[in-house]
Amino acid sequence: MTATMPLRIAMWSGPRNISTAMMRAFENRADTAVVDEPFYAAWLLRSGAEHPMREVILVAQPTDPDQVISGLLGPIPGGRRIFYQKHMAHHMTPDMDLEWMSACANVFLIRRPVEVLASYAVRRPDASLEDIGVVQQCDLFEREADRLGAPPPVIESADVLADPRRALTALCAAVGLDFDPAMLAWPAGPRQSDGVWAPAWYDAVERSTGFAPIRPPASLEDLAPGLRPIAEAAAPYYESLARFKLG
């Protein structure tokens, strides 16, 4: 199966959700260019959020969303046929134009909120429901489903870790691509395509050479008491997306 080229894949995720490993998998394809969270600086400026390396990010990326969109819809870097775009759903603020999404194959990468919070709290223990992006993912999913008249692809991170070949084969088929075995392994180390925030977040993925083995699932009791209500509030949004995940 071969999609009409060029193909732009917008992968919508929240933090701590194998999103960078997924970017590595696609970047390891010879036909694919990637971009790492291109709306991060625009969101930081609008939200006022205090994130690690905030000032560096604001200088490194455009803060004008229209400029970001022009880059996403312009020529694909390196003359490649496929443009894989790693996005955080919560980076899209209400004032940002979303019409550009119609030029992309939009996919939604999900993870159980308990797992997300258990990982996120290691770096930012005061996480909020807004921070983990699942509400925004649902909004974007519903918007895209309305446009398509059918649910867009949803992929579960645990399914990728449990059987990367099977999950990535299903994902590629859903966006009209042939699976490439090169997606299963990559060289360790940083990439020029990584966001400037990589030193604060990407230590594990920089050591990786493929998808990590799946770990025993976290439970609500594993979270700090203050995070448990957030996990419970996020669960219905996650479940609404999980109903549509690729088999």
Image: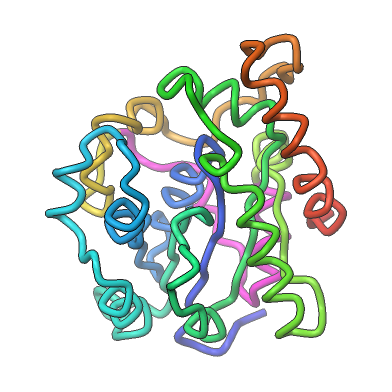
Judge left or right: residue 160 versus residue 184. Answer: right
The residue lying at 24 percent from left, 31 percent from top is 199
**Can residue 115 be seen by looking at this rendering?**
yes
Q: From this view, report whether residue 33 is shown above or below residue 203.
A: below
Residue situated furthest bottom in the rendering: 4
Q: Which of 87 and 215 is in front in this view?
A: 87
| Residue pictured at 53% horizontal, 56% vertical | 89
Q: Quadrant of the N terminus?
A: bottom right
Q: Where is residue 106 in the image (x, y as percent from the top left)?
A: 60, 71
Q: Which is more toward the observer, 129 or 101?
A: 129
> Could you say where residue 144 lies in the image, as x and y percent from the top left?
68, 76
Q: Nearer the viewer, residue 95 or 38?
A: 95
Taking 16 as reference, is 174 left or right?
right
207 horizontally vs 134: left or right: left
Measuring from the top left, give residue 231's x and y in whole percent.
71, 29
Which residue does the image show at 25% across and 40% down from the upper left?
197
**Is any part of residue 36 visible from this angle?**
no
* Rendering colour mode: rainbow
User: Which stretch is magenta?
Assistant: 165-188
